[in-house]
Image (cartoon, coloured by chain):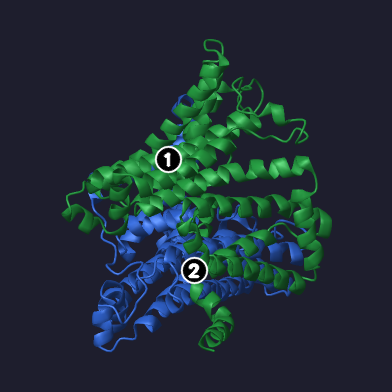
Amino acid sequence: MSKLRKIFATDSYIVPLVAIVMGFLVGAIVMLVGGYDPIAAYSALFKRVFGSPYDFGEAIREMTPLMFTGLAVAFAFRSGMFNIGADGQVLIGMTAASVVGIKFAGALPNFVLVPLAVIIAGVCGGLWAGIAGYLKAKRGINEVITTIMLNWVALFLSNYIVRSFLLLQGQNRSEDIPASLSMTFLNSVFDNARLHWGTAIALAAAVFFYVYLWKTKQGYEMRAVGLNPHAAEYAGMNVGRNVIKAMFISGVFAGLAGAGEVLGVFHYQSVFAASPGYGFDGIAVALLGLTHPLGVILAAILYGTLTYGSAGMSFGADVPPELIRIVIGSIIFFIAAQGIVRWVLKPFYFKRKKEKVL
Amino acid sequence: MEILGQLLNTTLVFSTALIFAALGGIFSERSGVVNIGLEGLMMFGAFAAAVGGYYAQDAGMGDWAPWIGVLCAMVVGVLGALIHAVASITFKADQTISGTVINFLAAGSTLYVVKLIFEGAGETPLLDGFNKVAIPGLSKIPVIGEGIFNSYPTTYLAIILVIVIYFVLFKTPFGLRLRSVGEHPSAADTLGVNVNRMRYIGVMLSGLLAGIGGATITLTTTGTFAHNTVSGQGFIAIAAMIFGKWNPLGAFGAAVFFGLSQAIRNYVQLFEWSKDIPQEFIFMIPYVLTIIVLVSAVGRSSAPKALGEPYDPSKR
């Protein structure tokens, strides 16, 4: 409880909140300059998300992979690495889940098949990220460059696997996947929105993230390596092993996102012409969430709301949905450049201090 | 032999944008500011070149229109980079974060403006762009003539800039100051170098060059600007910069390597034997090869020492 109070007693929550407001303001100004009505646009945005149970469910669906990839990027950040490769890890996770979900469908009962597909997706995503971790640990190769390269390799590899082994005749996608993560019992409540268990797994992953990094010895080592690898090494920690492990766990999160998408949402896997971009959204979510698991979940909710609602903006107020990227970019900008926010807040703080003196 | 010349030519077409952007990245990172925003800066450039070039063409400027496009790209690229500079240098924001912001703002604002100007279209009108210029005499040399001396003007510009920037970085006082600010800012400060000013220059030059890089794509390859015009080439440019060890010559080599593997991908499909290989494996070649080369040859890459740290004079 005291910890909770500490969070809210400091200004750590004020800065992000003000940043969000300022981000919306920037968006509004951009809309005014473009000759649009910002109030109509923002109300169309929120109406789209909260207007019907179906849309609300779909917005949650949109948030789920963001939670996973946000956690993936944040976890790597905490261990001192920049995982630009969540995108490729998601694809590998998708492909692994599709392969297991289709090829073992007859042989295993559903209650074994589905968890197996999810676990293998996570492990494959983890191993894929582990390649970058291994190369960093053993060869000192910058993980930024390897994860960028691995994104492309993952794209082509998964397309190859789908085209060669899982293809639905005459279509540019895999066969339907019998294994399903869908929460079908919620269909009546949410009007058949594509809700799935991935959301619950993502929340569990956030809890794991927190407990592992802040409550275990291994997590302590990982953070130490992230903060100062030289000091960690001097203290007797194995930096290389921690780097590989951190990348593996980061990749597991991303791989699970892939499992959620194919097993819970689409129930098939497409042949992608270009990278689907989950990983890059994940970078934004991780940064918005200040790389803290709770922050990441909140950031994913915000990000998912804005992106899902942006479609409503273009229908309802004729505003190009790309505007929302300006809003999100500005929010991240103001969170990153906290100096600007503090400068805006200065008059208020000044007043408060005066009152205390009196 | 003829196909070799064509391959070389296509390689340079693909490499040019990467060369510009990687050179930009070098300026920024050598001064100590991480620039993950190259992708966004290229988008700004590609967008400005498409819009500026379109209006210049419309105004009947003919052959000069693409150059107006390049000029617009330079201006918009610098303005985009300025956001990164203000956030990461003046307000000491995390440089990775503010670079990501650039990518977001670029992706959002360019398409927003395109839709605004061209009444909802997601793409700019098709431009004439640059024409290839054959250099008299030299273009008659077998293979190389076809390959190098019959290229777009931007390609010549890129090759010249590689040499100029190498010289500027390593042979001039300005270059020494820029590098010193990225290696040991407090020492540079003691010697009277204005750290933040040098970093501003580095970041803005990176916007200028990445902007030209983006312009190259619209003016020589695609002819239009849409959401997928840049599609990850900024990140490839970052890879080329790291691959080339933050050295203009190295980055040039790496950019040509990426260009070559992209070009090979187009040419290999002309051969009969390639039918037996799944196309995805051919597409993968450049990326797998990069990793293999990194593992076997280059080894530990040496980034500028103060890369990523905002300069705080009160710290030692």
Label 2: how many residues lie within 10 Å, few (<14), some (14-19) or many (20+)?
few
In the image, B168 versus A82, the foreground residue is A82
Tag 1: residue type? Answer: Gly
Q: Please indicate whether residue A25 sits to the left or right of residue B105 in the image.
A: right
The residues bearing labels 2 and 1 have C-alpha atoms spaced at a distance of: 33 Å
Q: Please indicate whether residue A62 sits to the left or right of residue A157 in the image.
A: right
Residue A245, located in which quarter of the rendered image? top left
Q: Which mark is residue B144?
A: none
Residue in the picture at 22% in, 54% down: A232
Tag 2: residue type? Answer: Thr
Q: Please indicate whether residue A240 sits to the left or right of residue A322 in the image.
A: left
The image shows residue A55, relative to residue A28, as above or below, that is above
Mark positioned earlier in the residue sequence (2 or 1) = 2
Residue that numbered label 1 is attached to? A251
In the image, A317 versus A286, the foreground residue is A286
Q: Secondary structure at mark 2?
A: loop
Question: Can residue B1 be seen?
Answer: no
Residue in the picture at 19% in, 53% down: A233
Residue in the picture at 59% in, 68% down: A19
On the image, the x and y values in percent for residue A223 come to 32, 53
Q: Secondary structure at mark 1?
A: helix
On the image, the x and y values in percent for residue A41 come to 78, 62
Q: Chain of mark 2?
A: A
**Chain given the colour blue:** B
On the image, the x and y values in percent for residue B184 come to 25, 75
Q: Chain of mark 1?
A: A
Q: Which mark is residue A10?
A: 2
Residue in the picture at 32% in, 78% down: B178
**Chain given the colour green:** A
Labels 2, 1: front one: 2
Label 1: how many residues lie within 10 Å, few (<14), some (14-19) or many (20+)?
many
On the image, the x and y values in percent for residue A145 come to 37, 51
